[in-house]
Image (cartoon, helix red, strand yellow):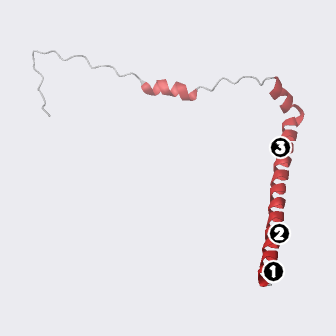
Amino acid sequence: MTVHPLHTDDAPSPPQERPDTASAYDSTWTEQPNTQPPDDLEQVMLADGKIYVVLAVVLIIWAGLIALMVRTDRRIDRLERRIDDTGSEDTRQ
C-alpha cells in the first residue's frame, strides 16, 4: 500500500460530514407502532371473556382427540397380541 504525502500547494478538502446514523436508528426503535383499536370481532371476543371460552373449547377438542388416539392405540395393541397368541397356538399343534 502506497501512502502519498499531501502536497502543500493542494488545499485539503473539507472533511466530509458523516450522517448521524445513531439518531436515525434511535427514532426507529423508540417509536411505538401505531396501535389500532380492535375491530368488531376482537371487541366481541374480548368482551365478557368470550375468548377464554373459545380457548377452553379448543383445548377440550384437542384433549379428546389425544384421548381417542391413545385408546385406539391400546385397542390395536391388544388385537395384535391376540393375533400373535392365536398364531403361535396354531404352530404348536
Outermost residue to the bottom: 93
Left or right position of 11 against 90: left
Quarter the N terminus occupies: top left
Judging by the rendered image, the residue that carries numbered circle 2 is 78
Q: Which is more foreground, mark 1 or mark 2? A: 1
Left or right position of 30 against 23: right
Q: Secondary structure at mark 1?
A: helix
Judging by the rendered image, the residue that carries numbered circle 3 is 58
Choose between 31 and 45: the one closer to the eye.
Answer: 45
Choose between 8 and 31: the one closer to the eye.
Answer: 31
Q: Secondary structure at mark 2?
A: helix
Query: Looking at the picture, how far across and down is residue 25, in whole percent?
Result: 49, 27
At label 3, counting other C-alpha atoms closer than 10 Å, the crowd grade (few under 14, some 14-19, many 20 or more) is: few
**Mark 2 or mark 3: which comes first in sequence?**
3
Residue for point 87% across, 36% down: 50
Query: Looking at the picture, how far across and down is residue 85, in whole percent?
Result: 80, 76
Judging by the rendered image, the residue that carries numbered circle 1 is 89
